[in-house]
Image (tube, rainbow, N blue to C red):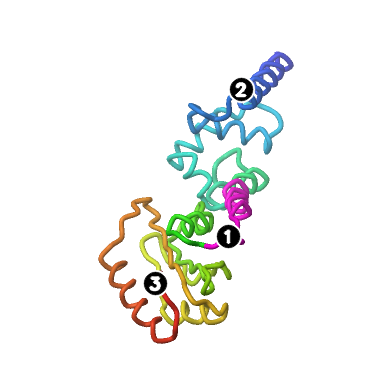
Amino acid sequence: MAERRRSIHTGHRQRVKDEFSARGLAGWPDHRVLELLLYYAIPQGDVNGLAHELVERFGSLAGVLDAAEEELCRVPGVGQHTAVLLKLIPAAGARYLQSRADLGEPVRRTEDAYALLEPYFFGARNEMVYVLCLDGKRQVLGVRKVAEGSIEMAEVNTRRIAEEAIGLRAAKIYVAHNHVSNLAIPSQADWLTTDVLRAALRPIGIELI
């Protein structure tokens, strides 16, 4: 009976893998995506129940991948090996997006800056602030993280931003920060901070685009 159960599970795993190879993840519920990931951390047995439990506990696939390693390990059936794999997924995704960003092209539009900066916020659990530094011809000099705060706010430090821009000999900069809620609407504080920062940088020859 046990041998028969193992063969059913093995066949199920192969069918799931074949379906992904043929059609990708389109239309899959979160627990099924997670089940496929768990195959590579837990090589034997039925992990469907564990996938359901993880999604129920953390709310979604994103919630599972965003959870801290110690939180994941509190779930029965999840050891460090599995937790590390789950944490690796968003980390590898962020690295993948960063590696695709072409730092050699001039940044001529806000959309170009967005494409370069977006990977740095991939999987972020807190609000963060990044600065994209450009030379006078809008060539990229570098991207620097200048702040990381809480889930609700991150402090924009004008001096820190100026130091990073001067250090890279930037003539122009973009400043970006995320809203963890995914509601990308600038607050009144965001607008005020932008005005203050622009006024502070102008006298030292740095343009806030």
Observer-side mark, 2 or 1, equals: 1
Residue kind at label 2, given as amino acid type: Glu
Q: Nearer the viewer, residue 198 or 144?
A: 198
Residue 69 is one of the magenta-drawn residues:
no
Total labels drawn: 3
Residue that appears at 44% across and 59% down = 109
Q: Which mark is residue 19?
A: 2
Camera-nearest label, 1 or 3? 1
Q: Main secondary structure of the magenta part?
A: helix
Residue 4, by quadrant, is: top right
Highlighted magenta segment, given as a residue range: 87-106
**Is residue 91 in the magenta section?**
yes
Q: Label 3, on which residue?
A: 155
Question: Label 2 vs label 1: CA separation?
Answer: 38 Å
- Tell whether label 1 touches label 2 (CB within 8 Å): no
SS class of the residue under badge 3?
loop
Q: Which mark is residue 105?
A: 1
Q: Identify the residue at the far bottom of this view.
A: 203
Q: Residue furthest left?
A: 188
First in sequence, mark 3 or 2: give its number: 2
The answer to whether 119 is drawn above or below residue 2 in the figure is below
Horizontally, is 152 left or right of 10 in the view?
left
- Disc 3 packing (10 Å; few <14; some 14–19; many ≥20): some
> Is label 1 in a helix, a strand or a loop?
loop
